[in-house]
Amino acid sequence: MVNKEAFNCERVWHEISNYLEGDVEPALRTAMDEHFRTCQRCSSVLAGTRTVIRLYGDERMMEAPSGFGRRLERRIAQNVRVTGGRWSVWSTWLVPVAALLLIAGGLRVANSLTAGPQLKSEHAQPGQGIPLDMMVVVTSDAKLFHLAGCGFIHNKQTERTLTAKEAIREGYVPCLRCMREYLSTAAKGHSALGAEADAHLDTEEGTTHGGGE
Amino acid sequence: MVLNNPVVRNPMQDAETTREQDLIARVQRGQNELFYELVKPYERRVYAAAFAILRNETDAEDVAQEAVLKAFANIRQFRAEARFSTWLIQITVNEALMRRRRERTVVMEGIDDRRDEESDYAPRDFADWREIPSEALERKEVRQKLAEALASLDRKYREVFVLRDMEQLNIQETADALGISVASVKTRLLRARLMLRDLLAAGWEQGWFSRLPFEKGNKPW
């Protein structure tokens, strides 16, 4: 119930944004509607706030520098391989490259099993086999990284999205539930992507993974 | 006016959605040449999200391009239950925040950020609200004034406002993208909207919206 005695303009201003979101209890909405009918100040605030949302939400407010679209298209064309357009084309060169990296970097990869970032959990394997550019989710005070939407994410209000590479670098380890597909790939041996992951972390960061506990 | 994810759709929107889903599926199957066609409708939104965080045109363009390439690299991880535009904007925000962290520009605005977050904001101008028609946005100088008003907000208010009211993310998606709580999003959004309302009211007095069609004896209020 809304206490009408305590219902004043300050209360309306405090709730006006939630009111526009449709995020107030029915009783409060009714009380606010009634207040707007009789209070000129608050109806002015409501009208103005609506105008702000309408004007700024207009597509015309989304401006980009001249030529931005053309430059973006060119950048995509330079970076996106259009060779008959099959992902399998990527894998046909990725596998031999990964194999070469494995051979050439064999010693370093072996060393990587004993040194690396401090894992947040001693009872998990590091993120081998996970595609490095994949977007994953971590939360503070937790040890795992997840796919977005995983049902085992705790403390969701501190959720943060980053790449798997960054999560691994920060010491997070993969969630065994949502990352199962990638981990089973890695477990069969060093997968192509896993090897690439090691190589990337090795060369770019000067660090390596720790081994599985 | 209730803003929460309107469910009313029209056949045009449905056709657009179907077309987009088809494009996504084809790019996921390897038709890479279609990727630009997929992101083109959102390219200005991607830039605007990056600019809201970085406040620098060069950095914003660079980050916007990087974010689009990252989206391409991860297109197979995209799941149909999400909106493609939201996913793209979230990647962009993440890239922009990482860039800012790396370049430590956050220090420049850190002092403002500690001010007044918890205190209530009282609107200032209570004159009868003069409705501003959307046609006003046809004029570049009006858009410029609105952009300047937005730029004058503290970073934390500006970012939430841009993601919710301009990029049309919902409250939860805005919280996720910025790594803050839903309660913080609501508090900052309220304040951003009220401050912009006051700035527009003041702008009216300063003649930002002069030469509008309704001044020729067709006043709507």
Image (tube, coloured by chain):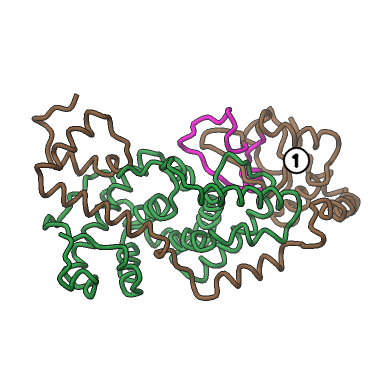
Res A105 visible: no
Q: Is residue A126 left or right of residue B122?
A: right
* Colour chosen for chain A: brown
What type is the residue that disc 1 sits on?
Gln
Chain at numbered mark 1? A
Q: Nearer the viewer, residue B203 or B115?
A: B203
- Asked if the stretch drawn in magenta spans residue A173, the answer is yes
Which segment did they paint magenta? A147-174
Residue B143 lies, with reference to residue B22, above or below; the image says below
Q: Nearer the viewer, residue B31 or B126?
A: B31
- Quarter holding the N terminus of chain B is top left
Q: Is residue B191 left or right of residue B3?
A: left
- Asked if the stretch drawn in magenta spans residue B56, the answer is no
**Quarter-wise, where is residue B110 in the image?**
bottom left
**Quarter-wise, where is residue B137 in the image?**
bottom left
Question: For the view shown, which residue lies furthest in the top direction?
Answer: A1
Question: Horizontal and vertical percent for residue B102?
Answer: 54, 59
Question: Horizontal and vertical percent for residue A208?
Answer: 73, 47
Q: Quick one: SS at disc 1?
A: loop
Question: Horizontal and vertical percent for residue A117?
Answer: 67, 43
Q: Nearer the viewer, residue B118 or B136?
A: B136
**Quarter-wise, where is residue A14 in the image?**
top left
Write the residue at 71% across / 57% down.
A204
Question: Horizontal and vertical percent for residue A173?
Answer: 66, 36
- Quarter holding the C terminus of chain B is bottom left
Disc 1 target residue: A128
* Colour chosen for chain B: green
Q: Is residue B64 left or right of residue B139?
A: right
Write the residue at 67% across / 28% down.
A177
